[in-house]
Image (cartoon, grey):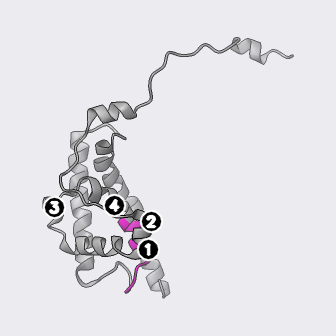
Amino acid sequence: GSTPEAAAQVVQWVSFADSDIVPPASTWVFPTLGIMHHNKQATENAKEEVRRILGLLDAHLKTRTFLVGERVTLADITVVCTLLWLYKQVLEPSFRQAFPNTNRWFLTCINQPQFRAVLGEVKLCEKMAQFDAKKFAESQPKKDTPRKEKGSREEKLKPQ
Protein backbone atom coordinates (compact mmCIF):
# COMPACT_ATOMS: atom_id res chain seq x y z
CA GLY A 1 0.00 0.00 0.00
CA SER A 2 1.10 3.52 -0.77
CA THR A 3 -0.14 4.92 2.56
CA PRO A 4 -0.07 3.51 6.09
CA GLU A 5 -3.84 2.91 5.82
CA ALA A 6 -3.48 1.05 2.53
CA ALA A 7 -0.59 -0.99 3.94
CA ALA A 8 -2.78 -1.95 6.90
CA GLN A 9 -5.58 -2.99 4.54
CA VAL A 10 -3.16 -5.20 2.60
CA VAL A 11 -2.13 -6.91 5.85
CA GLN A 12 -5.81 -7.39 6.74
CA TRP A 13 -6.52 -9.11 3.41
CA VAL A 14 -3.45 -11.34 3.74
CA SER A 15 -4.59 -12.31 7.23
CA PHE A 16 -8.16 -12.86 5.98
CA ALA A 17 -6.88 -15.21 3.27
CA ASP A 18 -4.85 -17.21 5.78
CA SER A 19 -7.39 -17.42 8.58
CA ASP A 20 -10.76 -17.32 6.79
CA ILE A 21 -10.23 -18.74 3.29
CA VAL A 22 -7.58 -21.45 3.69
CA PRO A 23 -9.50 -23.67 6.18
CA PRO A 24 -12.76 -24.09 4.22
CA ALA A 25 -10.94 -24.12 0.88
CA SER A 26 -8.70 -26.96 2.10
CA THR A 27 -11.63 -28.88 3.55
CA TRP A 28 -13.48 -28.70 0.23
CA VAL A 29 -10.62 -29.05 -2.27
CA PHE A 30 -8.16 -31.45 -0.62
CA PRO A 31 -10.45 -34.50 -0.84
CA THR A 32 -10.86 -33.89 -4.59
CA LEU A 33 -7.07 -33.99 -4.94
CA GLY A 34 -6.74 -37.19 -2.90
CA ILE A 35 -4.88 -35.35 -0.13
CA MET A 36 -7.50 -35.77 2.56
CA HIS A 37 -10.37 -38.15 3.26
CA HIS A 38 -13.87 -36.91 2.41
CA ASN A 39 -16.24 -35.95 5.21
CA LYS A 40 -19.65 -35.03 3.78
CA GLN A 41 -20.74 -32.75 6.65
CA ALA A 42 -17.38 -30.93 6.77
CA THR A 43 -17.49 -30.43 2.99
CA GLU A 44 -21.03 -29.03 3.13
CA ASN A 45 -20.00 -26.64 5.91
CA ALA A 46 -16.94 -25.61 3.89
CA LYS A 47 -19.10 -24.92 0.81
CA GLU A 48 -21.32 -22.62 2.85
CA GLU A 49 -18.30 -20.86 4.33
CA VAL A 50 -16.79 -20.39 0.85
CA ARG A 51 -20.15 -19.03 -0.34
CA ARG A 52 -20.10 -16.51 2.53
CA ILE A 53 -16.50 -15.49 1.80
CA LEU A 54 -17.15 -15.05 -1.93
CA GLY A 55 -20.15 -12.92 -1.01
CA LEU A 56 -17.99 -10.67 1.19
CA LEU A 57 -15.43 -10.34 -1.60
CA ASP A 58 -18.17 -9.67 -4.13
CA ALA A 59 -19.63 -6.82 -2.07
CA HIS A 60 -16.17 -5.31 -1.50
CA LEU A 61 -15.28 -5.53 -5.21
CA LYS A 62 -18.56 -4.05 -6.45
CA THR A 63 -16.92 -0.64 -6.91
CA ARG A 64 -13.26 -1.70 -7.02
CA THR A 65 -10.95 -3.28 -9.56
CA PHE A 66 -8.48 -4.50 -6.93
CA LEU A 67 -8.76 -5.23 -3.20
CA VAL A 68 -6.68 -2.22 -2.08
CA GLY A 69 -6.05 0.84 -4.22
CA GLU A 70 -5.96 1.04 -7.99
CA ARG A 71 -3.34 -1.59 -8.76
CA VAL A 72 -2.38 -5.12 -7.82
CA THR A 73 -1.01 -5.44 -4.29
CA LEU A 74 0.11 -8.31 -2.11
CA ALA A 75 -3.53 -8.51 -0.98
CA ASP A 76 -4.67 -9.47 -4.50
CA ILE A 77 -1.80 -11.89 -4.99
CA THR A 78 -2.46 -13.65 -1.69
CA VAL A 79 -6.24 -13.89 -2.02
CA VAL A 80 -6.08 -15.00 -5.68
CA CYS A 81 -3.56 -17.72 -4.83
CA THR A 82 -5.69 -18.82 -1.88
CA LEU A 83 -8.77 -19.07 -4.13
CA LEU A 84 -6.90 -20.64 -7.05
CA TRP A 85 -7.60 -24.31 -6.29
CA LEU A 86 -11.25 -23.53 -5.53
CA TYR A 87 -11.60 -22.00 -9.00
CA LYS A 88 -9.69 -24.87 -10.61
CA GLN A 89 -11.37 -27.79 -8.80
CA VAL A 90 -14.80 -27.02 -7.37
CA LEU A 91 -16.24 -23.61 -8.27
CA GLU A 92 -18.25 -24.70 -11.27
CA PRO A 93 -20.11 -22.02 -13.28
CA SER A 94 -23.43 -22.53 -11.46
CA PHE A 95 -21.73 -21.96 -8.08
CA ARG A 96 -19.65 -18.95 -9.08
CA GLN A 97 -22.36 -17.13 -11.08
CA ALA A 98 -23.67 -15.53 -7.87
CA PHE A 99 -20.36 -13.67 -7.47
CA PRO A 100 -19.81 -11.63 -10.67
CA ASN A 101 -17.54 -9.02 -9.06
CA THR A 102 -15.33 -11.64 -7.44
CA ASN A 103 -15.10 -13.52 -10.75
CA ARG A 104 -14.26 -10.32 -12.68
CA TRP A 105 -11.53 -9.47 -10.19
CA PHE A 106 -10.14 -13.04 -10.16
CA LEU A 107 -10.02 -13.14 -13.98
CA THR A 108 -8.50 -9.66 -14.14
CA CYS A 109 -5.74 -10.72 -11.75
CA ILE A 110 -4.88 -14.10 -13.28
CA ASN A 111 -4.66 -12.48 -16.70
CA GLN A 112 -2.09 -9.91 -15.59
CA PRO A 113 1.30 -10.71 -17.15
CA GLN A 114 2.95 -11.12 -13.74
CA PHE A 115 0.33 -13.67 -12.62
CA ARG A 116 0.50 -15.54 -15.93
CA ALA A 117 4.28 -15.74 -15.69
CA VAL A 118 3.94 -17.70 -12.45
CA LEU A 119 0.58 -19.48 -12.75
CA GLY A 120 0.49 -20.11 -16.48
CA GLU A 121 -2.93 -20.37 -18.04
CA VAL A 122 -5.55 -21.08 -15.38
CA LYS A 123 -8.38 -23.34 -16.53
CA LEU A 124 -11.51 -22.69 -14.51
CA CYS A 125 -13.56 -25.60 -13.23
CA GLU A 126 -16.40 -26.68 -15.54
CA LYS A 127 -17.71 -29.46 -13.30
CA MET A 128 -17.21 -29.70 -9.56
CA ALA A 129 -14.56 -32.31 -8.75
CA GLN A 130 -15.61 -35.05 -6.36
CA PHE A 131 -13.79 -37.18 -3.81
CA ASP A 132 -12.01 -40.06 -5.49
CA ALA A 133 -11.42 -42.92 -3.05
CA LYS A 134 -8.97 -44.60 -5.44
CA LYS A 135 -6.87 -41.42 -5.79
CA PHE A 136 -6.94 -41.02 -2.00
CA ALA A 137 -5.78 -44.62 -1.47
CA GLU A 138 -2.96 -44.18 -3.98
CA SER A 139 -1.74 -41.03 -2.25
CA GLN A 140 -1.47 -42.71 1.14
CA PRO A 141 1.87 -44.18 2.22
CA LYS A 142 2.13 -47.92 1.83
CA LYS A 143 1.97 -49.82 5.08
CA ASP A 144 5.08 -51.97 5.13
CA THR A 145 5.71 -54.66 7.63
CA PRO A 146 7.86 -53.24 10.41
CA ARG A 147 11.53 -53.76 9.71
CA LYS A 148 13.71 -55.38 12.29
CA GLU A 149 16.64 -53.19 13.08
CA LYS A 150 20.08 -54.72 13.25
CA GLY A 151 20.85 -55.28 16.88
CA SER A 152 18.59 -54.53 19.76
CA ARG A 153 18.20 -51.16 21.39
CA GLU A 154 20.29 -52.32 24.34
CA GLU A 155 23.16 -53.30 22.05
CA LYS A 156 23.14 -49.86 20.46
CA LEU A 157 23.32 -48.19 23.87
CA LYS A 158 26.20 -50.40 25.08
CA PRO A 159 29.50 -48.50 25.37
CA GLN A 160 31.99 -49.49 22.71
Q: Earlier in the sequence, mark 4 or mark 1?
A: 4
Q: Secondary structure at mark 2?
A: helix
Answer whether labels 2 and 3 touch (C-beta < 8 Å): no
Task: Where is residue 42? Give x, y as percent.
Answer: 25, 44
Give the residue number, with chain letter if any, for mark 1. Answer: 114
Q: Going 35% across and 53% down the picture, which residue do you hit?
A: 23
Give the residue number, with chain letter if any, for mark 3. Answer: 93
Give the residue number, with chain letter if any, for mark 4. Answer: 84
- Camera-near label (1 vs 3) is 1
Q: Secondary structure at mark 4?
A: helix
Mark sitting on residue 118: 2
**Which amino acid type corresponds to the residue marked 1 in the rendered image?**
Gln
**Which amino acid type corresponds to the residue marked 4 in the rendered image?**
Leu
Task: Where is residue 98? Give x, y as percent.
Answer: 14, 67
Is 154 in front, or is 135? 135
Query: How far, Cα to Cα, is label 1 from label 2?
Result: 7 Å
Magenta run includes residue 27: no
- Depicted 46 relative to depicted 68: above or below: above
Give the magenta range: 70-80
Q: Which residue occupies the extreme left position in the image?
A: 94
Answer whether labels 1 and 3 touch (C-beta < 8 Å): no
Answer whether labels 1 and 2 touch (C-beta < 8 Å): yes
- Depicted 9 relative to depicted 48: above or below: below
Task: Where is residue 93? Give x, y as percent.
Answer: 16, 61
Is 43 in front, or is 81? 81
Q: Going 23% across and 57% down the picture, which residue do you hit?
A: 125
